[in-house]
Image (spheres, grey):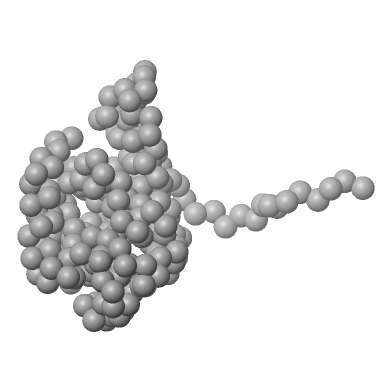
Amino acid sequence: MAKKPASKIRASINEELKRYSPSARKILMSAQKLFAEKGIDGVSLREIAVAAGHSNNSAVQYHFNSKEGLIQAIFELRVPFLEAARMRRVEQLKTSKKILLEDLLAALLFPILEMFDGQEQRIFTLFSTHLLSRNTLDHPFYRAQEKMPVSFRIYSMLEENLSHLPQDVFNFRIRLIAGLFLSTILERQNFSHSANGFYSDDEIFWGDMINVLAALLREPFRPERRPVILALAG
């Protein structure tokens, strides 16, 4: 998969940052790094303010109203070029005779690989991983719906493709594959230099991962009860 030059990615982020004052930019960049390292609940507003060089503990509230506002701003910082990358993939799918589940997952997930590299990818991945524990409607993805029409179009296409799943099961599995994909990015970074065999090729590796995630989604829901803990005999 083609990768966007890192200089252009940084230029895109810097363009988005221009919407904020220099003081707010420092808060954004400091907060995303702290959230990635320590988790969202593990970082206080005071800690963010200090890291951004502010003596005033209310600096975050001044610029972003609340911690939630700051989290949303960090998430939306990368929305424009993720949307652009997803749009290119959706446009390519229009020429396909049949759109497969694997194609939709690649359109949704692969832009994360294409648009980020190195440290930027790691920060984004860790930050996004910490967001997965949130309730569906509280996730910044849903709050940014108006700014992410392409992403929600892909999401709707996935729902249509997986209409055999109850809605709650679909939502849970989508969150599950998002977590698996993000953790796989980190795992791939950890062993990429020593990988061998089939997985020495990035395209083979990620192709296999998409197939695995598609299989997880495609599996029918079976409301079977299985004992989680087996009762001890006698």
Residue 234 x %, y %: 92, 47
Nearest the eye: 1 or 234 = 1
Q: Is residue 215 above or below residue 53?
A: above
Q: Place residue 92 in its image quadrant.
A: top left
Q: Is residue 161 above or below residue 110?
A: below
Nearest the eye: 227 or 118 = 118
Nearest the eye: 56 or 187 = 56
Q: Is residue 53 left or right of residue 16?
A: right
Farthest residue toward the front? 55
Residue 188 x %, y %: 35, 35
Residue 65 visible in the shown view:
yes
Q: Is residue 13 left or right of residue 136?
A: left
Q: Residue at x 17, y 46 (%)?
A: 115
Q: Is residue 118 above or below residue 10?
A: above
Q: Residue at x 33, y 29 (%)?
A: 192
Residue 148 visible in the shown view:
no
Q: Is residue 1 left or right of residue 61?
A: left
Farthest residue toward the right? 234
Q: Quadrant of the N terminus?
A: top left
Q: Place residue 118 in its image quadrant.
A: top left
Q: Residue at x 28, y 52 (%)?
A: 124
Nearest the eye: 95 or 137 = 137
- The number of numbered badges drawn on the structure is 0
Q: Is residue 59 left or right of residue 83?
A: right
Q: Is residue 214 above or below residue 20?
A: above
Residue 71 x %, y %: 30, 68
Q: Residue at x 15, y 38 (%)?
A: 3
Residue 137 x %, y %: 36, 72
